[in-house]
């Protein structure tokens, strides 16, 4: 009886220690296919934008992302992005990305020559208001103890 009890306790312990991923990695192919192609960020908005500065993706001020160009390749989840705002420092980089079943956009900005599996840091944003010609990526940030949405508005480039 002791052995049976011990096995039950061990089974519960191992089940409760099962690791879970912070983001689901099962992809939403339909959403990804709609993102395929070339895009530009037409605006970045968030409440209180005239009072605070937001650093996006640890790269630059969020307003520097307005006018940035993005290319998403859906069959291999790669692409590239470039900051092109003339009032900001230029930047370009390859990226890897995917959209999971929860509608989360998972992004890694890569340095030249880096493989995605070697890059530990990434970003998780929510996909919203998606059409064939536009979509939004929404980031949640803490501003003075209050969660605030940062909305990146993407427009399709023909």
Image (spheres, helix red, strand yellow):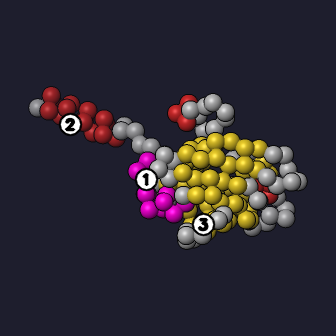
Locate residue 138 relative to residue 24 in the image: left or right.
right
Residue 8 marker: 2
Q: Are marks 2 and 3 in contact (CB under 8 Å)?
A: no
CA distance separating discs 1 and 2: 35 Å
Specify which label sits upstream in the sequence, 3 or 1: 1
Image quadrant where residue 122 sits: top right
Q: Secondary structure at mark 3?
A: strand
Q: Position of residue 108 (x, y in %)?
A: 60, 43
User: Is residue 23 within the magenta segment?
Assistant: no
Q: Secondary structure at mark 1?
A: loop
Find disc 1 in the rendering and name its residue: 27
Can residue 78 be seen in the rendering of this structure?
Answer: yes
Nearest to viewer (mark 2 / mark 3): 3
Specify which label sits upstream in the sequence, 2 or 3: 2
Quadrant including the N terminus = top left
Locate residue 68 relative to residue 108 in the image: left or right.
right
Q: Position of residue 80 (x, y in %)?
A: 64, 47
Q: At 81% across and 46% down in the image, what residue appears?
A: 90
Q: At 85% across and 62% down in the image, what residue appears?
A: 51
Q: Are marks 1 and 2 in contact (CB under 8 Å)?
A: no
Magenta region, residue range: 24-35
Camera-side residue of 40 and 7: 40
Residue 14 marker: none
| Residue closest to the far left | 1
CA distance separating discs 3 and 1: 17 Å
Can residue 53 be seen in the rendering of this structure?
Answer: no
CA distance separating discs 2 and 3: 49 Å
Find disc 3 in the rendering and name its residue: 135
Camera-side residue of 153 and 51: 153
Q: At 46% across and 54% down in the image, what residue appears?
A: 100
| Residue closest to the far top | 3
Q: At 54% across and 51% down in the image, what residue appears?
A: 73
């Amino acid at each position: 009886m002791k052995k049976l009890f011990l096995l039950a306790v061990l089974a519960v312990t191992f089940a409760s220690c099962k690791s879970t991923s912070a983001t689901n990695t099962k992809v939403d192919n339909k959403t990804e296919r709609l993102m395929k192609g070339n895009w530009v960020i037409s605006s970045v908005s968030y409440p209180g934008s005239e009072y605070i500065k937001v650093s996006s993706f640890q790269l630059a001020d969020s307003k520097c992302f307005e006018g940035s160009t993005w290319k998403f390749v859906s069959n291999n989840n790669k692409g590239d992005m470039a900051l092109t705002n003339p009032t900001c420092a230029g930047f370009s980089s390859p990226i890897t990305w995917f959209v999971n079943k929860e509608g989360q956009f998972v992004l890694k900005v890569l340095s030249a020559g880096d493989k995605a599996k070697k890059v530990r840091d990434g970003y998780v944003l929510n996909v919203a208001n998606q059409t064939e010609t536009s979509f939004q990526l929404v980031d949640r940030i803490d501003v003075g103890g209050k969660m605030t949405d940062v909305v990146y508005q993407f427009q399709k480039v023909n």
